[in-house]
Amino acid sequence: MRTPRLLAVVFALMSCAATAQEAPEQAMSAKSAFQRYPDAPSVTRHSVEINGQTINYEATADTLTLVDDEGEPRAKLFYMAYRKIDGGMDSARFPKATERSITFSFNGGPGSSSVWLHLGIFGPRRVQYADEAGNPGAPPYTVIPNAHSLLDKSDFVFIDPVSTGYSRAEEGTSEKHFHGLESDLDAVADFIRLYLTREKRWSSPKIIAGESYGTTRAAGLMQRLHSRHGIATTGVLLVSPVLEFQTIRFGDGNDLPFPMFLPSYAATAHYHNALPDKWQSRPVADAIAEARRFALDEYLPALLKGAALPAAERNRVRLTLSELTGIDPQYLEDAGLRLTQPRFSKELLRHRNQIVGRLDARFIGIDADHVGERYSYDASYEAIRSNYTEALNAYIREELQYESDLPYEILTSVWPWDYGSAGRDRYVSVADRLRDAMHRQPHTRVYIAMGHHDLATPFFAAETTLNRMKLDPSYRDRIDLAYYPAGHMMYVHQPSLEKMKADLDAFYDSLP
C-alpha cells in the first residue's frame, strides 16, 4: 500500500522540480519575445511630389547609442531620417554633402516626441485632416503624401529626446539624468555630433528646427554645438517660440504675462465673433494692433501701479480690456484686471456652454462643469492627439517597416524638469544664449513662426523678448518673423500650411 503512494509522491516532486526548471526558460522566452529594438536599422526608399518636382529619398529609422566618458552606454536615441537620392529609386548616389543641407528637428514639451513637426509640415508624409481648419474627423487616421514638405530644400533628421518616442535610458542609467535643460542639451548635441560623424555630413550646411519648448532647446543647442563641438549652424527655425518663461508664466508678483497674452485674446475673440461691434466689424489686424498698443502703453503701467491706480484710470483700463477681449467688465474687475489664459479660455464662450483651446484657440469644446473657473481639457490638443498618434504608429510600421514593441511616447511626463542655473531663483530664459550665438556666428539666419490663436506661447511674448534681448541692431535683419491665422501647430490649418511652405522655401533659399 505504501509503495504506490511513495512513488506518487516522488513523481509529484520530480514534476514540480521539472516545472520549476522550465519556468525560468519560459520566462526568458517570453522576455525575449518583447522586441525593444530591431537588430538593424530599417532603410526604405520612397518618393513624394513637391512643387511639381518628384523627390526620391531614402528613409532610415534607427537609434544611436550615447556613451559616457568611459564608453559605457547611457541612452538610445531614436530618430527618423530622410535623405534625397540623386537619380531613380535604384540609384546609389546622394547629393554631395557640401551641396545639401541637413536639418535636425525636434518638438518640445519637454516630454514631446518629434511627431508634430515631422508629420505636420517638414516630413514627406503628413497627417490627413477632415477639413481645412484641421479637424481630425472620424478614425481611422493615416498619413498622406505631403506636397508641402521641406524635403526639396533639405535632408531631415527627426530626433526623439530620452523618454520620448522610442528613446530610452540604458540599463543602469536613470532617465532622470536626461530630464533637465543642460543635460538635454548635452544629449541632443552629442547625438548631432555622432550622426554627422557616422553619416559623413560634417561638410553639410546645418540647420536646427524646434517647436515650443523645442525652441528653448534650439536656442541653447545653437550655442552648445558651437562652444562644445565647434559645430556652426546656418539656420535656426523657431516655431511657436518661448525663449523667456517670465512672459508666459502666470503667478503672484509676475504681471508680465497679462499684457503679453492680450493680442492673442483679441485675435481669438474676433475669430469667435465675441468682440463688441466696435472691433468685430473691423479686420482682425486692427484689433491686434490696438491690443499691442494698449498692452504696453496703458495696461502694463496700470498693473504696475496696483493700488495706486486712480479710480477713473482703472475704469478706463477695465472697459478697454473688455472691448479687446470680449470678457464682461465686471468679471475683469473681480479678477483684478488680471485675465489668465485658463480663465479666458473658460469665460469667453461660457454663454454658449463652450470652451476654447489652449494650443489653438480656434478649436472649441464642451465642459461638463459650465460654472467652473477652469476648463477640464484642451479642446485643441484633443483635436490632434489621436490622429497624430495613430498615424505615426501605422506609418512607422507599415511604410518605414520599423518594428518595436515599446510604446511610442508621443507626449509623456518628464517632471520634475531641472532647469539648472537658467531657472535657479528666476524665470528660465535662453534669449541671452540665442543672442550670444548669433553674435558669434554672423552668417546664421533665424526664422520665427507664430500663430495668432496660440494661447500657449503667444506671439506678442516672443516679439517683446526679441526686442529686449540686446541683439545688435545690425543683426536684426537676420531674423524673419512669420505670422499665421492659426495656433501653436499652425500647419494643421491648410491656408497656414501653404503660407508656411512658401515662407520656409524663401528662408532656405536665403541661407548662405
Image: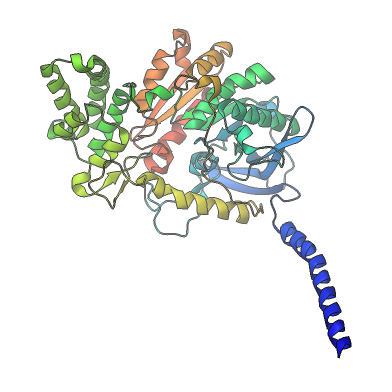
Q: Quadrant of residue 403?
A: bottom right
Q: Is residue 352 above or below residue 443?
A: below
Q: Is residue 161 left or right of residue 240?
A: right
What kind of colouring is applied to the model shown?
Answer: rainbow
- Quadrant in which the C terminus is drawn: top right
Residue 297: x percent and y percent? 24, 15
Q: Is residue 351 left or right of residue 458?
A: left
Q: Quadrant of residue 180?
A: top right
Foreground of the two, 417 or 151: 417
The residue drawn where x is 45% and y is 30% is 503
Q: Is residue 454 above or below residue 354?
A: above
Evaluate whether residue 103 shows in this view: yes
Q: How many numbered discs sit on the rendered protein?
A: 0
Foreground of the two, 371 or 111: 371
Foreground of the two, 404 or 284: 404
Q: Residue furthest front?
A: 2
The residue drawn where x is 26% and y is 21% is 295
